[in-house]
Amino acid sequence: MTLKSYHTLDVQGKRVLIRVDFNVPVKSGKILDDTRLRAALPTVKDVQARGGKVILLTHFGRPKGRDPLLSTAFLQPTLEEIFEGPVLFAPDGVAPSSVATTQHLQDGEILLVENLRFHAGEEKNDPTFAKELALLGDVYINDSFSISHRAHASVEGITKHLPSAAGACLLQEVEAVARALTHPKLPVAALVAGSKISTKLALLENLLPKVDFLILGGGIANTFLRAQGYPIGSSLVEEDMIHTAQQILEKAPLQDCRIVLPRDAVVAETLEGGNPHTTTLDPIKPTEKIFDIGPQTVTLIQEILDTCQTIVWNGPMGVFEVAPFHEGTAKLAQHVGSLTQKGQVFSIAGGGETVAAITSAGAAPLFSYLSLAGGAFLEYLEGKTLPGVSALKA
Ligand code: ADP
Ligand code: MG
């Protein structure tokens, strides 16, 4: 899908509404990770350089009505550092007083608007609210992929009222997924792991006809191993998904897809202090649980990835939060990173825990693309149409 690019919008002297996702993680008033704030830089700088007035729209948290604890005002000083200049604030949110403020902005100035979710109309995609919101600007840019799976007023409704386009981040993310799944260099491998099949079923179904290798790990692989008849101790298994796993295993060869399952595992009785050790699949004791893929499996997967040109990854291979069960994920992350750096593969990964695992393995900067979006990334890989994306079709 080709999107209208923000480059094609005339922004000179205009009030440019930019929908960002500044829903950053915060603890005791401190921003733990400012990646989402920095991500806005390319689009904001471009609009400033072309003489536009920047008006930043975001939600923060899940307020029910106006909630001072969830005001976006606290972002102001950090944004001023990142954008290296003053950032004004519109405390009334979507209101005539804020419209007046936007009308007094100078070219290149930045205004941050109060939390959009203080207004009930935002999440309801209320047409009247979308119209009021549109009064704050002359043109609109969506620069947030992570919110684009929601048909909210600031994502979808607003595009009916203003000339609209996609910003740098949104374009980049859509292009990265297209490069991995729509027109990839073959062969393509998908690594799908994490805790549960039930949350990844739509993803597995969509990937099956698109990829040459579907490499499974984590709790997901357990259910598949069980479907193949392996006794896997007291590992996490979704009993009601065993039949579905069997069907996927049967369907795969018809779609020219090879499903790759673990050959060995790292097991223990409990996560903490339960004598973790490597084992082949056959003698897993009834009291033991699989918490990671084993070294043989890591080597097997690495050899497969060596033959590929495109790699898509969602879901950690093991309970990466607890050592030593992070090792399978960490070794694969480093391997994918090094294949990427050698120019052998295009690699894309996404998902909250997946990105955390790749980051803690030190491999994040080595990937071609890491998605900032959790739910939206997953829905896009599932082949769903995202309302915020289709609203900007060229
Ligand atoms: P993402 O957020 O990247 O989409 P998921 O939420 O699907 O990933 O899965 C991540 C979780 O899966 C992690 O918290 C991890 O501990 C868990 N997990 C991985 N392997 C196993 C396993 N063998 N048994 C239990 N949990 C696992
Ligand atoms: Mg998760």
Image: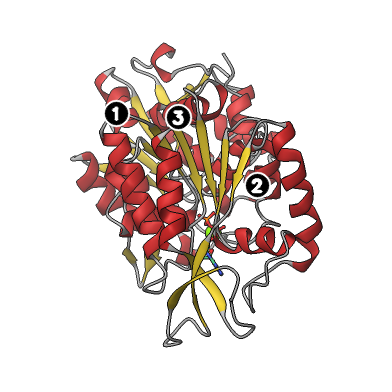
- Residue type for callout 3: Ala
Check disc 3 and report the residue beneath it.
176
Check disc 1 and report the residue beneath it.
343
Spatial CA distance of label 1 from label 3 is 16 Å
Instruction: Please determine whether, in this image, residue 73 is positioned above or below residue 27.
Output: above
Q: Nearer the viewer, mark 3 or mark 2?
A: 3
Check disc 2 and report the residue beneath it.
123
- Residue 83 is situated, as x and y percent measured from the top left of the image, at 23, 39
Secondary structure type for disc 3: helix
Residue 250 is tagged as none
Q: Callout 1 environment at 10 Å: few (<14), some (14 to 19), or many (20+)? A: few
Mark 1 vs 3: CB contact within 8 A: no
Spatial CA distance of label 3 from label 2 is 28 Å
Among the two numbered marks 1 and 3 on one chain, the one whose residue lies closer to the N terminus: 3
43 to the left or right of 301: left
User: Mark 3 vs ligand 1: CB under 8 Å?
Assistant: no
Secondary structure type for disc 2: helix
- Residue 57 is situated, as x and y percent measured from the top left of the image, at 46, 40
Residue lying at 48% horizontally and 21% vertically, measured from the top left: 139
- Residue type for callout 1: Gly
- Residue type for callout 2: Glu
**Quick one: quadrant of the N terminus?**
top right
